[in-house]
Image (cartoon, rainbow, N blue to C red):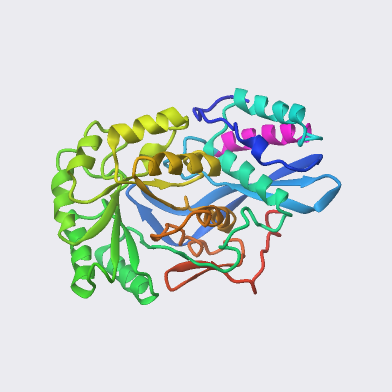
Amino acid sequence: MAKIGCQLYLPYISSIFVADMALEASFIKKTFHFSFKARTSRGSMVQKDSWFLKVWDQGNPEVFGVGEAGPLPGLSPETGEDIEKQLAEVIKVLAKVTNIHQLSSLLQVQEHFRKEALCSSVIFALETALFDLKNGGSRMIYDNSFLKGKAIPINGLVWMGGLDDMLQQVSIKLYEGFTCIKIKVGGLNFEKELDILQFIRRKYFRDEVTIRLDANGSFKTEDALYKLADCSRYDVHSIEQPIKVGAPLLAELCAKSPIPIALDEELIGINSPAAKIQLLERIKPQFIILKPSLHGGLLSCEEWISVAEARKIGWWMTSALESNVGLNAIAQFTANYPVEIPQGLGTGTIYSDNIESPLVVKKGFLTVDSKQNWDLSEIS
């Protein structure tokens, strides 16, 4: 399998297996279509592809785990062709595992994936599918409070558009009960984007509505600090990636900005514990934002959280526009931690043809409706 610039390995696989199984696996591609024009500073999207990995015990094929590899166009380094090659290789390796609770078998799997680079989205799919299978193939990735009905607070996402369109999105989100609004900036005239912030603050105080911004690296380094100062007049909670990845000014900006800065794209490709520590100690952001499909999978995000918390750096989780399969895994992972601030997990309704699931967004919270069921017929 050719390497594709995703220097990420899977040293965690032994922690997943607890049973004696002979595994079989397959994958399928599905294209999802946005229910609106999804626009960011990187361009517009009308559809998005995901690949679903299905894993089962050959003696009991009705019980299976499923995981989603959903790269984010414009950010993920892997292509669809790369993902299919990697998933095909994963399937071959899993087919050789017959006694995976034994150390010798574990080493066979581990050693293979240490030699071959796997990308974040593929690792996320593999982790999710194996955890799901381990827990009985019921879409339970982690047994925690989320599946028992405890809701996770989430932010309402306002996509880029014309001024009137974005103002309408803000009004709808507030009407729906969101108390944290995330606004993508960098695509309009900056003065018009300030008008949106002013619109919110004319109606709602800081303790009523939290404003987050996401610039996707669109601010120019020479005027970034001035723009941050202008935005700060409206009691903004934080801004994601104000300038482009790798910009030398970023550490200085984190030190001087009147608005706390959250790193997102900057974390992509930073995979070893030492590299994670080095990045956070060099830039010293106030927050990091984690996407398993981009940042090394679930267990790598667990490592990011540990490294960040040791340095008093805040964090929150967000989806990378996965379907409900990926969103479900991220939500359950998030619920392993005491959630104190809204997470970026409100993307379950962005597709007109999303996979039916028990996930429900209500009044600014993501929760599980026990009366609703999964429908995986299109991917299994």
Q: Nearer the viewer, residue 29 or 26?
A: 26
- The image quadrant that residue 377 belongs to is bottom right
Task: Tell me if residue 342 comes above or below residue 288 in the rendering.
Answer: below
Q: Please provide the residue range marked out in magenta.
A: 80-96
Residue at 26% from the left image edge and 33% from the top image edge: 247
Q: Quadrant of residue 359?
A: bottom right
* Residue 6 position in % (x across, y down): 51, 30
- Picture coordinates of residue 116, whole percent (x, y): 60, 25
Q: Is residue 306 visible?
A: yes
Asked whether residue 28 is in view, the answer is no
Q: Quadrant of residue 342?
A: bottom left
In the image, taking residue 207 as reference, residue 114 lies left or right, namely right
Residue at point 70%, 30% (across, down): 109
Q: Quadrant of the C terminus?
A: bottom right
Magenta stretch, main secondary structure class: helix
Question: Would residue 158 appear left or right of 109 to someone viewing this image?
Answer: left
Rendered position, 178 above or below 234:
below
Camera-side residue of 110 and 37: 110
Residue at (46, 59) in percent of width and height: 345
Q: Residue furthest bottom?
A: 175
- Tell me if residue 67 is in the magenta stretch: no
Q: Position of residue 263 (x, y in %)?
A: 34, 43
Residue 242 lies, with reference to residue 357, above or below; the image says above
- Is residue 90 covered in magenta? yes
Quadrant of the drawing holding the N terminus: top right
